[in-house]
Every structure is written in structure tokens, then in C-alpha cells.
Image (cartoon, rainbow, N blue to C red):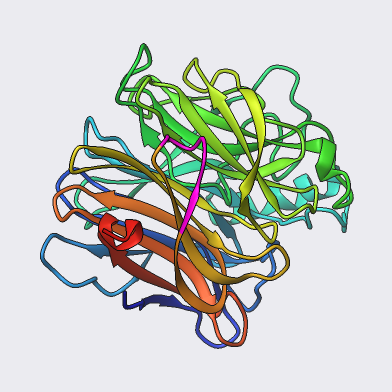
Amino acid sequence: MKCQRLFRGEGDDCIRIPTIVAAPDGTVYAFANVRVSTSRDNAAETHLMVAVKRPGCDWEEAKTVASRKDWSYMIGSAVCDSVTGKVMCFFKKIAVVLHEFKKEMGPEERNRLAAIKEERDGDKEGDYVLETTDGITFTQRKIEIKPMAGGASGFLLGKGGSPHGSGSGVTLQYGPHKGRIVVPARVSLKECVTWEDLKTGSSNTVIYSDDRGESFVTGGIVEPGTGEGTLAERSDGSIYYNSRAYFNDGLRRGAVSYDGGESFVEQSIHQDLIEPCCNAAVLRVEWQGKTIFFFSNPRSTTDRVDMSVYYSLDEGATWTYGVTIDHRKAAYSSMCYDAKSEKVFLLFECGTETSVDQIDVVEFTPDEILGQ
């Protein structure tokens, strides 16, 4: 399996947060965020980029599709509505960025400075989706994400679910919520001022839509101490949720929703999935009469190295190690499946100097992981 570089930051710029989806027509969309002049999460300026692969063609050159000087267009996850074929990439427009923990200024001062920039630039802070149906024309649309009941406010997360750093979304195919668009996200349970606070103050959740992405609602809490999750639908219509955890025990967390993401139960610890506390990806594949779940992440409990793929033949209940795709340093990943070519696409951060030197893509067929 050969890796191909799709994105790389120029100069001091850093490229991060890969997310990839496949449309029903076989077109594959890879999104990423350029952090201008820094690798930090609280970059003052970030841009959205996309690379497109059409059926039977090579990847097109990556291009910028949303940006504004001195603004952070912070990327979230992406989803393809399998009913309409519309691809949506979530992002948040931020005029004045605050560090996740260290607060350089109070909220009143931050909001005052943001209002000045909004008036100056004719832009508006908030949650947006970047939409396309052809990979040529991309439009921006501001959205409101209805918050969960009882959620605590916080600038980056807040009461409404934030899909930043989470896996790609899905359109449910089975059960009473068939057709619902479900996207993994995070939410604040309380204000977090230290990394330790994340153990009780952060939780994964979902945002979901029953009107083809026109509006979104924040779902239920997955488990306190989780963040940056990924999900797949099971054959009975339930949602399997796999989470990064902030407990520093090197293990992933699992949970299940039986009501389309409105609540989560059956929280578990995956003894067969190790992690260095990092984003990961889960993907459902229907192939040759089999239902296969794939999982990708750096296969280590301490270091972000060895991007690897596992598989599950019981829809996420248990996992089997498949293959290590790349032995370099590696971090965040995202996966999609194109049923027309019967190929899985794995998009991941990697490098020799750091784990975020570049973003590569590798494609493989299921039998290359299953060893058939």
C-alpha cells in the first residue's frame, strides 16, 4: 500500500485535522485545515482546503475553499448525505481566538474585539457548513446547532456540539431513524481550565439532522472524559461510538446509541484498542456479503507513531489488529469507503520530523486488511 501526499504546509504553516468522505457517485473529498505560521490549535488564521478524486482519475491538486485574512476558519468533520449526494464540511468562523486553557483576556474583551473585526471585514462568527455537490462549486452557509439541555458554556465547545477533531459523519441506513444525518462532536460539561479538567468537563456527543442538513440538534452525552470521537451504524440501526479518552490509560472507550444519537448507553473500555490519546477513525464497510468495521489510529500507548488499521467482524464489539500502514510518526486519521471501486481511503497526518509534517492518503481493499 503506497502513501500519497495530499497536503503539506508551506514555510511555517502547518496542515492538520484530516477528514474524508465518499459521495454516491464515487467522488472522494479530502478536507484539511492550514494553520498559518504555527502548528498551535489556537492559530489566529486558518484556512479550509480540499482535494478531490473523481472516479478513475488521479487526485486533483489541493485548493483553498474558505479563508479570510486574520480569521480562523477552524475545520470540523465532514459528512456526505447519501440521499442527496451533498457533501458538507463543518467549520467555525472565529475572529479572535482564545487558548483552550490559558485565557489571555476575559470574554467581554474578546467579544468586543470580535465585534470590531466583524464590522470591519463584513464577516460573522459562528458555526458554518461548506457545501458542494460537484466538487467544483463550494458554498458557505451559517448554521445554528441546537444545544443539549444542561450543557455548560465554553468558547470552543459550549452548549452546542462541536465537530472539531471528530470523525466523519454518516447517513443512517437502518431502523426508525433511517435517513438521519449523524455527525460525531464534542461538548463542554463545565468550564475546563486544565488538562485534568477534561476528565470530568469534556464529553463526546453527536449533532444530527432530520431535514437533510438544514438544521442540527446536539444529541446526548457519550461519557465524561471523552473527546474527539468517531462512529459507525450497526445493522440494527444502533450507533457504535468509539472515543478518545483523557484518562491517560492508553485505551479507547466504546458506547452505543439505540435512539439515533439522542442518548448513549453501554459505555465500555476497549482492551483490544490502544491509543496515545489521539483522534481515530471508525468505518463501516459492506463487502462481498460481509459487514466489516475498520478502525485506524497510531498503534501505541505512548507515542504518535505507526498508523495502523484494525478490523471487527462483530460491528465493534471486539477488534483484531490488521496491519500497520506506516511506521513514521503519525497522528489524526479519517476513513471513507467507495463502494464503486471497493476501496477504503485512509487520510492521515504523518511525517519524519513530526507527526504533522503532512497529510497522506492510502487506499486499500478490505482483503488487504483481512489477509484473505
Give how far across and how far down residue 234 sits, in percent. 40, 28
Residue furthest to the front in view is 372
Residue 342: percent from the left, percent from the top? 19, 53
Please determine whether, in this image, residue 206 is positioned above or below residue 355: above
Q: In which quadrant of the rendered view does residue 102 lie?
A: bottom right
Q: Residue furthest top?
A: 176
Image quarter (top left, top right, bottom left or bottom right) of the N terminus: bottom left
Is residue 336 something that shows in the picture? Answer: yes
Depth check: 164 or 332 in front?
Answer: 332
Q: Residue at x 31, y 61 (%)?
A: 371
Which residue is found at the position 70% from the left and 57% from the top? 277
Tell me where residue 83 sits by quadrant: top left
Residue pictured at 57% horizontal, 55% vertical: 74
Above or below, comparing residue 211 to residue 140 in the picture: above
Q: Magenta stretch: residue 261 in it?
A: no
Q: In the image, 28: left or right of 320?
A: left
Quadrant location of the C terminus?
bottom left
- Asked whether residue 20 is in view, the answer is no
Give x and y (percent) for residue 308.
49, 64
Dominant secondary structure, magenta: loop
**Range drawn in magenta:** 314-321
Left or right: 56, with 24 as reference point: left
Question: In the shown orientation, is residue 356 left or right of residue 290?
Answer: right
Would you say 235 lies left or right of 330 here?
left
Residue 138, image x, y percentages: 30, 52
